Amino acid sequence: MGNLPRLIVFDLDGTLIDSRRDLADAANALISERGGTPLDVEAIGRMVGDGAAMLVRRALTAAGIPVDESSVPRFLELYDARLLRTTRPYPGIHDALHAIRSTGTLAVLTNKPLAPTRKLLSALGLVPLFDSVIGGDGPFPRKPDPQGLQHLMQQYQAAPAHTVLVGDSPIDAATARAAGALFCWARYGFGALDELDGAGARADSPLDVPSAIARLLP
């Protein structure tokens, strides 16, 4: 197995970076503009994972505000202005990524649009650590559709048994399952996943990621 290609794919929000406050502030700014009452930050965090359109729909619906065709573009404007106010890599994530660089190819697969994804990765010093980055507005359907992950597996000739998706949400778990890949639960994130379902490994902090990967790809 040591000579076979290995692939480790990371979700972005709630896995590599703690972006909950900036996402929540942008959603609450939109709610406030439209006359609603801001929501709890943790409640908005649990809405993240299915892309901007779904986050906006969930947040506005929870605030009792109708969604219209201007809602998502306005949210993206508000979020772009807040993209890096408080968002940072989780403590220990740089060390974890450096520790597993020799294990296999590293990639990012996120439902966030590619432009802000690249801006964040660049500003936070994460770009050099990844060989590929796939955003939610590219040629592949968003997670939990497995096509983005399957493309990465084909690109780097990694079998499902030698591929790990690291993520914090049910969306990530379902994506790994649909592609036949292994799953590492970033339990420290803000996704709504409550338990590890089926085979996989759990990382309670970013510093646990290398040992979790080692258990999945011995």
Image: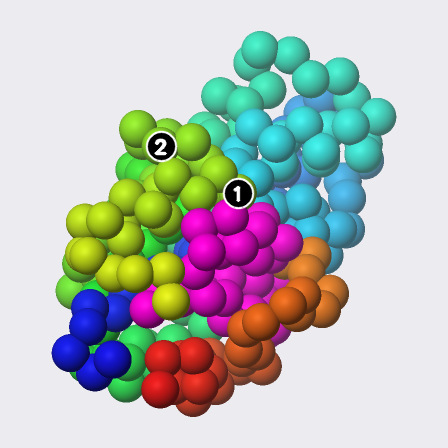
Q: Across the whole image, how many numbered discs are drawn on residues?
A: 2
Quarter occupied by the C terminus: bottom left
Disc sitting over residue 144 in the figure: 1
Residue 13 percent location from the top left of the image: 48, 55
At 33% from the left and 55% from the top, the residue drawn is: 108
Q: Is residue 97 above or below residue 63?
A: below
Quarter occupied by the N terminus: bottom left
Disc sitting over residue 93 in the figure: none
Distance from label 1 to label 2 (Cα)? Answer: 11 Å
Viewer-closest of 156 and 186: 156
Q: Is residue 173 a member of the stretch shown in magenta?
A: yes
Residue under label 2, please give it.
140
- Along the horizontal axis of the image, is 61 left or right of 55? right
Residue 45 percent location from the top left of the image: 65, 52
- Magenta segment, which residues? 162-190
At 63% from the left and 54% from the top, the residue drawn is: 170
Q: Is residue 49 a member of the stretch shown in magenta?
A: no
Q: Is residue 211 above or below residue 117?
A: below
Callout 2 amino acid: Phe
Q: Is residue 44 visible?
A: yes
Query: Label 2's element?
Result: loop
Q: Which picture quadrant has residue 35?
A: top right
Callout 1 amino acid: Pro
Q: Is residue 98 above or below residue 138?
A: below
10 Å crowding of disc 1: few (<14), some (14-19), many (20+)? many
- Along the horizontal axis of the image, is 199 left or right of 104? right
Residue 185 percent location from the top left of the image: 55, 69
